[in-house]
Amino acid sequence: MKFPAYYKSAAFAAFCVLTLQTAQAVAILANVSDAQAINTTGGSTYTLSVTAASETTLKVGRYDSDPANTAGDAPNGSNSAAIFAFLLPNFGEVANPFTTATFTFELAATTNNWNVGLDGLGTRNTATVSGEDFRFGNTNGTTVATVLQGTVVPSAGAVGSYTSNDFTSYLNSQYNNGANAGNYVFLRLAISSNANGVLPKN
């Protein structure tokens, strides 16, 4: 089976655009704590870990040191998902302060034909990414996730800028009438399926 090579997305170019009830538009930049959640594979051994972002890119997808499986064993390599943390502004104890919310990022390079999906990972009081934030197709860490867009980068997607569908209701639920103001909301880019909707295997 052919595995997807890494998708590379510009880590520090990612941002959310929010429109508030007052019709004010706010762009929130991705946090410097953005990182890759990685599942390192080797035979039947799987270890979740986190690798901090490089100066310019986060990786989404798979790297396999033996993609042709010439050794006749299980794939050896690693699967990665890109995790982004955004600080929720403090608008006080108000319900549903956001009227639109989108996520924009830059795809710097791609070498394969797998779909990339966008997930919401809830809120935390720090911007720390966990290895359990990992996803690769139907293989996930323990972090509870909500699918925000099944395909945000299509399998034939070209290098360039991408903007998600509106996920206002999700963001308002995470704000929770101000209970999570000042916390971080997490978004994840991860391989979701191929062009035919088939999930990848480890």
Image (tube, rainbow, N blue to C red):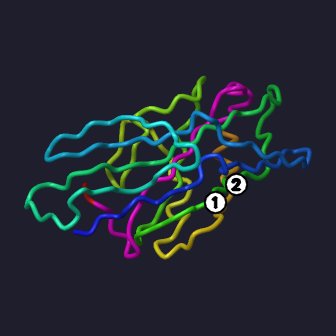
Q: Residues within 10 Å of mark 2 (few under 14, many from 20)?
A: some
Task: State yes or no: residue 193 in magenta.
Answer: yes
Name the side, left or right, on which 118 lies relative to 17: left
Residue 48: horizontal and vertical position, in percent?
32, 36
> Where residue 5 appears, x then y in whole percent?
37, 62
Q: Is residue 118 left or right of residue 13?
A: left
Count of labels in the image: 2
In the displayed structure image, the side of residue 39 where residue 42 appears, left or right: left
Image quadrant in which the N terminus is located: bottom left
Tag 1, which secondary structure? loop
Residue 149 within the magenta-colored segment of the rendering: no
Instruction: For the residues labelled 1 and 2, say whether their Cβ atoms are less than 8 Å apart.
Output: yes
Query: What segment is highlighted magenta in the picture?
Result: 174-200
Q: Earlier in the sequence, mark 1 or mark 2?
A: 2
- In percent of width and height, residue 106 lies at 62, 59
Residue under label 1: 164
Which sits in the foreground, 77 or 101?
77
Image-quadrant location for residue 181: top right
Amino acid type at image mark 1? Ser
Residue 20 in picture, x, y percent from top left: 84, 45
Q: Which mark is residue 102?
A: 2
Which quadrant would residue 50 be assigned to in this image? top left
Give me the C-alpha separation between circle 1 and circle 2. Answer: 6 Å
View extreme (front): residue: 55
Tell me which amino acid carries mark 2. Thr
Vertical arrangement, residue 79 with respect to residue 122, above or below: below
Query: Which residue sits at x=26%, y=69%?
Result: 2
Residue at coordinates 55% horizontally, 59% vertically from top-left? 149
Specify few, some or many for label 1: CA neighbours under 10 Å numbering under 14, 14-19, or 20 or more.
some
